Image (cartoon, grey):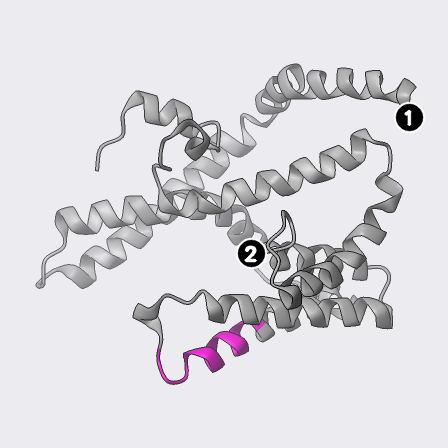
Amino acid sequence: MSVSPTQIAINFTMIAPVFGHNFVDGVYWVLPYELKFYLLVLIFLLLGIQTKLKTVFFLWPFALLLCKLSGQHLPYLDSYYCYFAAGAILAIMKNNLTPKLAVALLICLILCISFSIANTPPVVKSKNSDLVIALIITILFLFFLCVNSEKGSDLKLYGSRALGDLSYPIYLIHAHFGYMFISQFATEKNKYIIYIVTVLLVFIISYLMNIFVEKKLLKMWKMFFQKTIGDLISNIDRQLAGIR
């Protein structure tokens, strides 16, 4: 339940398993998938073929489907990347809704449902779990399609921006923190009170992270990453420009 300074430092890299350490919080499992996706896009940008990104993303669902049908397991063509492909297609559809993109999104929907059902832990499997999973994923796809529409874009939901700002800090801290807090203080008599207190604490801490770490220190973070990663990537880009 404790975390050493070494574990903290290695987890700051967001690729702790590469260094032989576990993530300090189980929810960080998604970070390597995100980083590999950003790395792929970075390679496209450095190669100067960013104008081909829409074509690549359009073909992505079809490549995922071919790999699934053939039983192959290739980088970026397996696992959770069906969800990444869906996000890319939805982004392209924002200003360019065409039948072929609709087909690509439908393929993503089928792949996401199939993957999620296949990877549902046995402990939560039930008679209707597959149907429930399919319905939840379908509703989420329809929600994002609605948001993509003209009327959906104009929809104003009070407090949605503030809640959206809190979503990532909540994701970062809710699991391990909540588990420790509930394990430490909850009993059969007070557990419902502790559940409420835990949720409130997660929201309060997330709010403080959003205000003081993300917003007030925004200029500092931009400067830090520009002077480290930003300058490095710019130098690489200049070197590759001549080759391109």
Magenta span dominant secondary structure: helix
Is 136 part of what is drawn in magenta? yes
**What residue is shown at x 28% (from left), y 49% (from top)?**
178
Q: Which residue is mark 2?
A: 79
Q: Which residues are magenta?
A: 126-137
Label 1 amino acid? Answer: Arg
**What residue is shown at x 52% (from left), y 74% (from top)?**
136
Query: In this rendering, is residue 191 above or below 165?
Result: below
Kindly indicate the quadrant of the structure image that contains residue 39: top right
Given residues 188 and 212, the one toward you in this image is 188
Q: CA distance from mark 1 to mark 2?
A: 33 Å
Q: Which residue is mark 1?
A: 244
Q: Quadrant of the N terminus?
A: top left
Residue 143 showing in the rendered view:
no
Q: In the rendering, at what x and y percent does residue 218 appear? A: 59, 27
Q: In the rendering, at what x and y percent does residue 101 appear? A: 81, 66
Q: In the rendering, at what x and y percent does residue 110 appear? A: 63, 72
Estimate how packed mark 1 is, as few (under 14), some (14 to 19) or many (20 or more) residues with alpha carbons within 10 Å.
few
Estimate how packed mark 2 is, as few (under 14), some (14 to 19) or many (20 or more) residues with alpha carbons within 10 Å.
some
